[in-house]
Amino acid sequence: MGVSITNFSRSGLSDWLIQRFSAVVLAAYSVFIVGYLLANPELSFAQWQEFFACTAVRIFSLLALISTVAHAWIGMWTISTDYIKQAAIRFAFQVTCFLAMFVYLVWGIDIIWGV
């Protein structure tokens, strides 16, 4: 069995830790956003814009975005290696996932820091 170079870190333990850490970040971010929405039921666009103009919120949002991409990549890599046995199809699937995640990451950064 050959060594795969398409996983995130070449280590199952590292991938597991990244998956768990990113899940905690995403859970914390979800609680943070839902909490803000519940605390501000009459939220206006100006308030929403001011909220995301705060550097701490932008950094937390960026961390959540990076966590989403890392979490998704490890999950999709795991699914593809478990269920797609033909190497060419698996590679095409992984490249497609990588490109989509890269585009979402760049687009997300533009949205977060372009406000």
Image: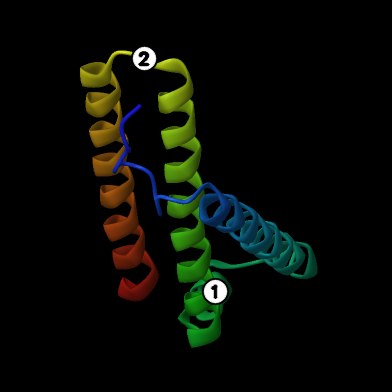
What percent of the width, then of the height, locates residue 77?
A: 42, 35
Pick whichever of labels 2 and 1 is earlier in the sequence: 1
Looking at the image, residue 53 sits to the left or right of residue 84; the answer is right
Is 64 drawn above or below residue 94 in the view shown?
below
Residue extending farthest to the top is 86
Q: Position of residue 79 (x, y in %)?
A: 48, 27
Image mark count: 2
Colour basis = rainbow
Residue with the most extreme front position: 1
- Hey, which quadrant is residue 47 in on the image? bottom right
Structural distance between the alpha carbons of marks 2 and 1: 38 Å
- What residue is drawn where x is 63% and y is 63%? 25
- The residue pinned by badge 1 equals 60
Q: Residue at x 70, y 64 (%)?
A: 28
Which quadrant of the figure contains the N terminus? Answer: top left
Label 1: which secondary element: helix
Find out whether the residues at labels 2 and 1 contact each other: C-beta distance under 8 Å: no
Disc 2 marks which residue? Answer: 85
Q: Residue at x 60, y 57 (%)?
A: 17
User: As drawn, is 27 to the left or to the right of 66?
Assistant: right
User: Depth check: 10 or 90 in front?
Assistant: 10
Q: Amino acid at mark 2?
A: Lys
**Foreground: 54 or 88?**
88
Q: Position of residue 110 (x, y in %)?
A: 29, 66
Q: Amino acid at mark 1?
A: Phe
Rate crowding at label 2 as few (under 14), some (14 to 19) or many (20 or more) other CA atoms within 10 Å. few
Quadrant of image for the C terminus: bottom left
Is 72 left, or right, of 29 in this rendering?
Answer: left
Identify the element where label 2 is drawn: loop
